[in-house]
Image: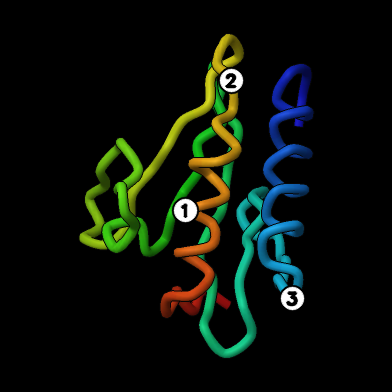
Amino acid sequence: MPGWKRDVGRRLDDLVVRTVPDVRKAVRWNSPFYGVEGRGWFLSFHCFTRYVKVTWLNGSSLDPMPPDDSKHEHVRYSSIHEDEELDEVLVAGWIRQAASLPGEGLF
């Protein structure tokens, strides 16, 4: 991950690992995926020019829902821009919820 996005990626990864100690990790389409054995994948993120897009694969079930909708019924997104602080309390809550729900089987 280039520039400032590298720190965002590390912080997200650290937050997932702290919140879900038994998390599984994989990389597909140049994006890290996070899941729980037997439940599937619940989170991914990807770099774009001006932001990091976090994909919540079961985001429509999270409370509160992540802010950005998707063409896919259950997927929601949240974006992190360079000048924004990562709300670790909110994101950790989403991670905790998402990891406890059935995820997606992408592999």
Residue topped by disc 2: 85
Residue 88: x %, y % from top left:
60, 37
Residue under the image location 58 percent in, 77 percent down: 107
Looking at the image, is 66 positioned above or below residue 39? above
Q: CA distance from mark 3 to mark 1?
A: 16 Å
Looking at the image, is 77 positioned above or below residue 57? above
Mark closest to the chain's N terminus, 1 or 2? 2
Mark closest to the chain's N terminus, 3 or 1? 3
- Mark 1: give few (<14), some (14-19) or many (20+) Cα within 10 Å: many
- The numbered mark at residue 63 is none
Q: Report the amino acid beneath label 3.
A: Asp
Residue at the farthest front position: 89
Residue under the image location 54 percent in, 62 percent down: 96
Which secondary structure lies at badge 1?
A: helix
Which secondary structure lies at badge 3?
A: loop
Where on the picture, by quarter, is residue 62?
bottom left
Left or right of residue 45, residue 65 in this image:
left
Residue at the farthest top position: 83
Mark closest to the chain's N terminus, 3 or 2? 3
Residue topped by disc 1: 94
The total number of labels drawn is 3
Where on the picture, by quarter, is residue 89?
top right
- The numbered mark at residue 22 is 3
Q: Report the amino acid beneath label 1.
A: Trp
Looking at the image, is 47 positioned above or below residue 54? above
Q: CA distance from mark 3 to mark 2?
A: 27 Å
Residue 106: x %, y % from top left:
51, 74
Image marks 3 and 2: residues in contact by CB distance under 8 Å: no
Residue under the image location 62 percent in, 60 percent down: 33
Which secondary structure lies at badge 2?
A: loop
